[in-house]
Amino acid sequence: MQEVVFDLEFIIGHYNYWLFVILMMTGLYITVSRGNLIKKVVGLNLFQTSVFMLYISMGKIEGGTAPILTGDPNTVYSNPVPHVLILTAIVVGIATTALALALVVRIREEFGTIEEDELTEIEEKLEFAEQGDDAIPVSGEASVNKRESGGK
Amino acid sequence: MIDLITKNLPALQVVIPLMAAPICAIFNRGRLAWTIAFIVAIVSFAISAALLSQTLDGGVISYHLGGWAPPIGIEYRVDVLNAFVLLIVSGIAVVTLPYAVKSVAQEIPQEKQGFFYTALLLCLTGLLGVTITGDAFNVFVFLEISSLSTYALVATGAERNRRALTAAYNYLIMGTVGATFFVIGLGLLYMATGTLNMVDLAHQITLRGDSRMLHMGFAFVLVGIGLKLAMFPLHLWLPNAYTFAPSAVSVFISATSTKVAVYVLLRFMFGIFGFDYAYQQSTLQYVLLPLALLAMFAASLVAVFQTDLKRMLAYSSIAQVGYMLLGTAFMTQTGVMATVIHLFNHAVTKATLFMVAGAFVYSVGSSKISDLKGLGRAMPWTSAAFVVGGLSLIGIPLTVGFVSKWYLVQAALELGWWPIAAAIVLSSLIAVAYVWRIVETLYLHSPSPDSKAKEAPLAMIIPMWVLAAATVYFGTHAALTSAAASRAASTLISASNIIWQ
């Protein structure tokens, strides 16, 4: 372990890593803290995008060009492997977002809301109704909402 | 031709289910899709059996994808450990599919069944791919293939209970956060070593020595995989996902997906970082061990108070993952062996129990414990299978559950950790409590007078009893599985020792 010294040049020189950390924490915080299901997906996207930035940063070589053969043996290329990995990760990210949005649409159809606290309330009532011996009718809220959403 | 097939077995293991999935989607007809899926499952099972028989003597199959040599190309690397896990995954797929016919026909509308089997095949592809690959980034890709299809499969439970949708959404958010942590970890490992091939990673780590980057990478990978395998405080997605998924999906994912994640953890910890990695030693001892113990007690206690059979089984799964992590945290040959053998044993046991729960859902329309009163008479075969599975969950001798606990306790005693051995026995007593609750409801309560419950169809009873018979067979003939598990553990350890010395 090397000694930790305050090195301004080091800190500024690694600005893209700082941005990665900020973006990552912003994304994770939005995912955890927001109650709106769409906003959670947005947070998740930010979180995933930050990783793209980490990988691209690590592949960059100072003075290196895009990794396309130039024929000149003295050319310095950036490392292409992280780029390829991130292409794959972007595809995974798109698939995840698409599936998440599809689920949100279905949730809205079934429950009539995409706010987490309202969903929790409806679910608690459902669970109560499931557990009780004499079925307590689920409050009309959900079904009313459903009708509303159907009308829109 | 035969030669060509035997040479390319590792690739075929993944490619066949992957290619069959879109075919299922094109012929979007339930029956046909099922037939394709079943044939594919049998072929996968045959391939993994062949791979296991080739590697059982300690050999390693290294398959270079597209002819590119590692570490630049992607390598599929099969040794006893992953051949064993491959066999578990494909074996469970073979038994689950005949079971799925009836339960899927009831729970999924006709026009969606083709897509259902497509997703199931993709899930199988992902799980097999995670297990077989020797490339760290490839693990992430396959992990996401299996996870994404699992989210979709869980969401299909919405036909029975709309809460499946929120369960799938929460699983998606947590699973993706886990996967992203895993990728960040891989990125840091790549920065520290410049390679993604597992064997080369292990080699480079020894060459370059310890660094803070490695510590960070290790921590990120641990948390990411921890989310996927439902390590105790990261388990919140699991109970709802298992409860509201269609019965066949509960059976399949409960028996395979967490097991494969445990395998990945074993591979990363011991295959890449090695036994002598000091940072890992302290992490395992001070983080993983307490969490495993907590899972064993807390999750079992929560299971006792559940009102739904499927949810109870889900909480018991979290506790069982605790046992697997405990075996890992011992960091001895016996400990790793106990983990590996428990992968198999728990897969068989939990699949039996979820099949029982699915049969109740099929016949009674619910898995609520209060609806199961007196079903021991109306559904004798299903109830008896529950008793067999339940005994195995507790760890009664003659069942597979006993074999795992035996090795776990042995591993604890080898280290002289008496309190932990006692904790294993004590937590099994809690399992007695929750299993007994169900057995009592089934046999000692009088059935409700208007109950029209009939025994589940034969197509569900037979797979259930094949697994129940396996719990007893491998419980009495433990030499078969323990030999494979022991060899798997030694391979993992010797590989890391050679590198470290």
Image (cartoon, coloured by chain):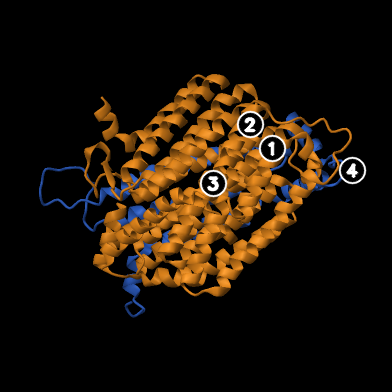
Chain colours: A blue, B orange
Instruction: Describe the element under mark 4 as helix, strand or loop.
Output: loop
Instruction: Identify residue type, mark 4.
Output: Asp
* Residue B314 at x, y percent in the picture: 64, 50
Residue B24, placed above or below residue B323: above
Q: Is residue B45 left or right of residue B64?
A: right
Q: Which residue is mark 3?
A: B347
**In the image, what residue occupies the spot 57% across and 22% down?**
B30
Q: Earlier in the sequence, mark 3 or mark 2?
A: 3
Residue B178, placed above or below residue A70: below
Which labelled disc corresponds to residue A134? 4
Q: Which residue is mark 1?
A: B382
Q: Nearer the viewer, residue A90 or B489?
A: B489
**In the image, what residue occupies the spot 43% across and 66% down?**
B331
Instruction: Identify residue type, mark 3.
Output: Ala
Instruction: Identify residue type, mark 1.
Output: Thr
Q: Are marks 1 and 3 on the same chain?
A: yes
* Residue A12 at x, y percent in the picture: 35, 68
Q: Which residue is mark 2?
A: B460
The nearer-to-camera label among 1 and 3 is: 1
